[in-house]
Amino acid sequence: MNDQAKGLLITAFGVLMIVPDSLLIRLISMDTMSVVFWRSFLTGSMVLAGLFAIYGRDTIRKTREIGRYGLVYAALLMFGAICFVASIRLTSVANTVFILATMPVFAAIFSRIWLGERISRRMVFTMLIVVIGIALIAFGSTKNETSSLIGDFIALCIAMTFALAMTVARKAKGVSMIPAVPIAFLGCAALVFPFADPFHFTGYDPLYVILHGGVFIPLSMTFLAIGPRYITSAEVALMILLESVLAPLLVWLVLGEDPGQWTLIGGAIVLGTLFLSNLVALKRT
């Protein structure tokens, strides 16, 4: 198996592992802050355990090396972790993941501002069309009972937050940001703990919580961190778009959540535009 096939397979597995994320958040009957706590605590603990398994005592040294950029990166991940659960609870899953798919657009803007990178003509056209798609999704939220403009706005904030985190990571590209991940998630768990009721379980909540934060998210983060070593960023971006398609379909299938025609139209515009844009970038590389 060549490197490209290996990278595509690893990345695809990572994407498939993140698909049930939104569904599990919906299935857990606990309050929002309790979901954030367990999601963050279990994910942070699993990643930290993995770091110690790989680096041993050097984990502490690796963590110190992240510097101030690593702390900023961790703070952004903390904010995004809280907002993601809130967005899933407030608006439809389709709205959240379609809006999150716009992250590369914001990453290009932030890279222009802080890294001085030129925004290509392809990305300018991509931005303009994506804005139309987001506007249609927002319009659909006023027509659909399962959606809300507040949840949509939070999803937009998440897209900008993660895009900024990617820009920070690129700014400090000589330093691995993986040790910042457990800082972010465990810090997030500590932050929301006073506002949560994490031990009030009902029904299948314990199973869903363990699968969510202890299995699917750590596996996804691990494989999505390994995959880009073997394939280009455009290929990674194309693979990640699969999550934006599969997650709403899974929620629709299991919970019967109909996102509405305007969300589907707007989402199709967003995902289709990003797909074609990344495909052009891939052909050029």
Image (cartoon, rainbow, N blue to C red):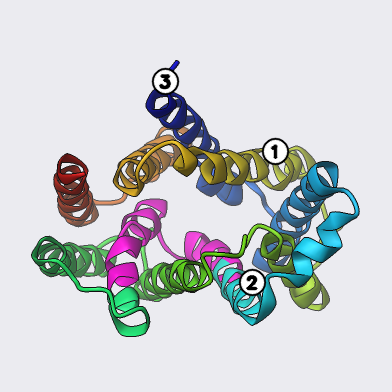
Query: The N terminus appears in which quarter of the rendering?
Result: top left
Q: Nearer the viewer, residue 235 or 25?
A: 235
Q: Nearer the viewer, mark 1 or mark 2?
A: 2
Q: Nearer the viewer, residue 213 or 273?
A: 273
Between the residue at mark 3 and the residue at mark 2, the CA separation in whole angstroms equals 34 Å
Q: Given the image, on which type of amino acid does mark 1 rest?
A: Val
Which sits earlier in the primary sequence, circle 1 or circle 2?
2
Residue 180, how many percent across, how many down? 68, 65
**Residue shown at the point (42%, 53%) measured from the top left:** 93
**Going by the picture, which residue comes out furthest to the top?**
1
**Residue shown at the point (76%, 42%) measured from the top left:** 210
Identify the disc placed on residue 2.
Answer: 3
Dots 1 and 3: beta carbons under 8 Å? no
Which sits earlier in the primary sequence, circle 1 or circle 3?
3
* Segment colored magenta: 81-108
Residue 240 placement: quadrant: top left
Residue 118 placement: quadrant: bottom left
Magenta region's main secondary structure? Answer: helix
Crowding at dot 2, Cα within 10 Å, few <14 / some 14-19 / many 20+, comes out as many
Between the residue at mark 1 and the residue at mark 3, the CA separation in whole angstroms equals 28 Å
Say which residue label 1 marks. Answer: 215
Q: Given the image, on which type of amino acid does mark 2 rest?
A: Ala
Name the element at disc 3: loop
Residue 164 placement: quadrant: bottom left
Q: Given the image, on which type of amino acid does mark 3 rest?
A: Asn
